């Protein structure tokens, strides 16, 4: 089959044949360059897809972390409110203990006074 492709060149002058050969070489070179660039393009497109997937994955992970962070902040707020309530309750109970301690001390004094009166 290649003989048929070459048949049209028969009878051409050597300078024309030389020019045809140069043009064919240039076409082959350009075909190879095109194939290389096509391969580079496909490689870059694959890398781009991979990066897009990575970015999407990181966006999803970021959203998950933001939700988790929000949940933890709400939990911290709730714990802080519970701590404040417990602290307030403790202050109230300490105040009640102090009042009752004072009442107990007063009652002891009254008892001592009454015992002294009884002894007389």
Image (cartoon, rainbow, N blue to C red):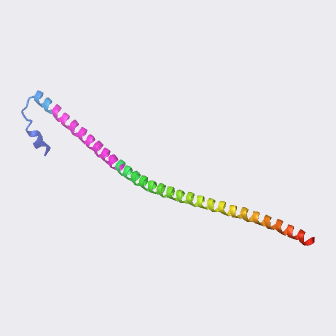
Q: Nearer the viewer, residue 101 or 83?
A: 101
Residue drawn at (21%, 39%), measured in percent from left and top? 31
Whether 11 is drawn above or below 98: the answer is: above
Residue 110 place in picture, x, y as percent:
82, 67
Say above or below: 105 vs 59.
below
In terms of depth relative to the viewer, which is nearer, 75 or 105?
Answer: 105
Q: Residue furthest bottom?
A: 118
Report if residue 30 lies within the magenta region: yes
Please report the bounds of the magenta region as a residue range.
Answer: 21-50
Q: Position of residue 119 (x, y in %)?
A: 92, 71
Q: Which residue is at the far left?
A: 11
Q: Position of residue 107 (x, y in %)?
A: 80, 67
Q: Is residue 49 left or right of residue 89?
A: left
Q: Residue furthest top?
A: 15
Q: Is residue 107 left or right of residue 117?
A: left
Numbered circles on residues, count: 0
Residue 65 among those drawn in magenta: no
| Residue 115 locus on image (x, y percent) | 88, 70
Q: Main secondary structure of the magenta part?
A: helix
The image quadrant where one finds the C terminus is bottom right
Q: Out of 68 and 9, give the one closest to the viewer.
A: 68
């Amino acid at each position: 089959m290649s003989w048929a492709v070459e048949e049209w060149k028969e009878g051409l002058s050597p300078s024309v044949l030389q020019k045809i050969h140069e043009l064919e070489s240039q076409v082959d070179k350009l075909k190879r360059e095109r194939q290389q660039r096509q391969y580079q393009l496909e490689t870059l497109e694959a890398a781009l897809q991979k990066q897009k997937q990575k970015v999407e994955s990181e966006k999803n992970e970021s959203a998950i972390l933001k939700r988790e962070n929000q949940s933890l902040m709400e939990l911290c707020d709730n714990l802080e409110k519970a701590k404040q309530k417990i602290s307030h309750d403790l202050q109230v109970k300490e105040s009640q203990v102090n009042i009752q301690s004072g009442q107990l001390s007063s009652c002891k004094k009254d008892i001592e006074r009454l015992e002294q009166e009884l002894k007389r």
